[in-house]
Image (cartoon, grey):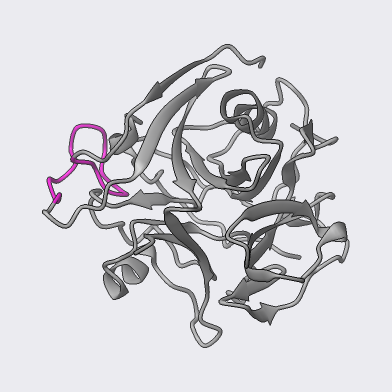
Amino acid sequence: MICSPTRPTLTGVLTALGLAALSLTVLSACSAEAPVAPTVTVTATPGVSTTAGNGDTAGEGTSDVSEDVIPVDTMRVEHGGGAYGVVTLDMAEWDVRVEWDPQSEGVLLSEVIEADPSIAVATNAGIFTTEMRPGGLLVADGEELVGLNLADGGGNFHLKPNAVFAVLDDGTATVVNSEEYDPAGVVQATQSGPALLLDGEVHPEFREGSTNLALRSGVGVSPDGTTVYLAISSGLTNLWDFATMFRDELGVEDALYLDGQISDLWVSGMSEPGVLSGPYAGVITARPRS
């Protein structure tokens, strides 16, 4: 069974995106989803301001912003009664990578950021096993480190269809049904599940108004493949609302669920992520193109 280790955590507090902190109880990232209608306001807040790091409560963040802050296009999106932090990455301006060290027994987000100051955005890459290995395909810098996983099983990863987020050698990105994945031209990739959207259609197992609520993180790609959206909920949400947020507010037709309660999304200018931001068996990072 593929899952992320169950543990208590706090949201990655994206006060830079205008999102409040929320304390969360222990929930499993392995639970199957049997997932309100979109009424929305989108407020763009480009750049990054002083923020609270993971583990801080609202209003108690430390002021760690330095002169080395890398501007990141962020916004707060309100949808279906919930709020989401969204990072927008134009592929012409950002080098988006999937990173994992096979020798590592898991990595904290703070370690990833400390190791490379050029990283401006970092988030967990997808569901992984209790052995701290990616649950499915992972490609880093053109090298396939873990093969595609098309097996059946329990938990969110195996809630078919699942999908692959990939960066291609032509500088575009895509989210594709795992069953239709083609390795040609792929330089970065991570497989997770379930797919949130494929060709504009919400996953068939999601249900509007579902009470299966959790913190959610995900990745979506614009229809032309030139823009990547990384998103995290500010509180508990169901997969229906998360999927329709990508579709109705961002114009995304293909999006992938990355993980649940253990998720975090860090942007330059925020406080260093805490010990609850990980360990992960892979991360998605973004650096400005030179």
- Examine the rendered structure and indicate whether residue 250 appears above or below residue 137: above
Q: Position of residue 81 (x, y in %)?
A: 53, 17
Residue found at the very far top of the displayed protein: 39
- Taking the image as shown, residue 3 lies to the left or right of residue 290, namely right
Give the image location of residue 10, x and y in percent: 39, 45
The answer, for residue 217, to whether it is visible in the render is: yes
Q: Left or right of 103: which side holds 32?
A: right
Q: Quadrant of the C terminus?
A: bottom left
Left or right placement of residue 60 versus residue 72 in this view? left
Residue 23 picture location, percent across and down: 39, 38
**Residue plotted at (66% across, 29% down):** 247
Quadrant where the N terminus sits is bottom right
Q: How many marks?
A: 0
Q: Residue at x 39, y 21 (%)?
A: 43
Q: Where residue 165 appears, x then y in whole percent?
A: 66, 57
Q: Nearer the viewer, residue 251 or 160?
A: 251
Considering depth in this image, is 73 or 27 the residue closer to the camera?
Answer: 73
Instruction: Report whether residue 133 is seen.
Output: no
Residue range in magenta is 50-65
- Look at the picture and state if 250 lies above or below 254: above
Give the residue at x 83% y 49%: 161
Q: Would residue 63 be counted in the magenta stretch?
A: yes
Specify whether residue 159 is painted magenta. Answer: no
Q: Nearer the viewer, residue 61 or 149?
A: 149
Q: Which residue is outermost to the bottom?
A: 103
Residue drawn at x 38%, y 58% as measured from the top left: 276
Q: Please tell me whether the stretch drawn in magenta is mainly helix, strand or loop.
A: loop
Of residues 164 and 225, the one drawn nearer to the viewer in this rendering: 225
Q: Is residue 127 left or right of residue 120?
A: right
